[in-house]
Amino acid sequence: MNRIMIMVFLASSFLLLALHVHATETIDEKRLDAVAERGSHVMPFDLEKTTHIFSKTDTGGIQQVIAKDQSDTEQLSLIRLHLSQITQEFKLGNYSNPEKIHGTSMPWLAELKAAKPGQVKIEYKELSDGAEITYSTSIEKLKLAIHRWFDAQLSDHARHAAPDHHHDSSHLHQ
């Protein structure tokens, strides 16, 4: 009898674990779909033709959007237009576009919105295959906010994003 109970317990535990993993994957897929849908109304470029790259640095981070086809001038133009515009918005503390895509409770976004002017230096740069925004600060709490915000974006843009562990992107795009 003990042996049967143990077998039933193990089988039940395995089934519950499998159901939990499947439910989590389904929820994650639904979130990814929702983020991509909302993103298509905010970001003018095609997510399927581009890649977001998030690089954490010692002073903050570098966010890049790269066209998968460097000869796709339409995507390059749309990437540059969008990143240039949001750089100006971010400098003013306006993070409404990320909120539209990821929600108002996106991790660490509130800390970035609360930063005083000049506490986070935000710079735009064109790349041969896209564009980038560099975020830098000497304030530890804001560095952490940038890093965690990047983690949240990587999670939400999983199909269209990649982490990059280089601290200097200039070697990537010459």
Image: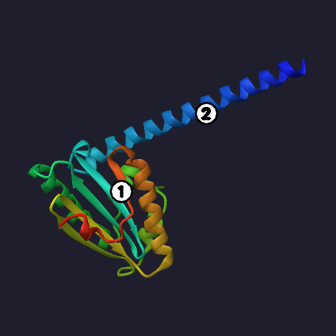
Q: Secondary structure at mark 1?
A: helix
Q: Residue furthest right?
A: 1
Number of on-image labels: 2
User: Looking at the picture, which amino acid does disc 2 mark?
Assistant: His
User: Looking at the picture, which amino acid does disc 1 mark?
Assistant: Pro
Q: Pointer 2: what residue?
A: 20
Where, quadrant-wise, is the N terminus in this rendering? top right
Q: Quadrant of residue 81?
A: bottom left
Q: Is residue 79 left or right of residue 96?
A: left
Q: Cβ–Cβ below 8 Å for labels 2 and 1?
A: no
Residue 29 sits above or below residue 8 on the image: below
**Foreground: 4 or 52?**
4
Q: Residue at x 20, y 50 (%)?
A: 44
Q: Residue at x 55, y 32 (%)?
A: 23
Q: Pointer 1: what residue?
A: 98
Q: Is residue 76 left or right of residue 38?
A: left
The answer for how far apart the CA atoms under marks 2 and 1 are is 29 Å
Residue 3 is situated, as x and y percent measured from the top left of the image, at: 86, 21
Circle 2 or circle 1, nearest the eye = 2
Mark 1 Cα-neighbour bin, 10 Å: few <14, some 14–19, many ≥20? some
- Sequence order check: which comes first, mark 2 or mark 1? 2
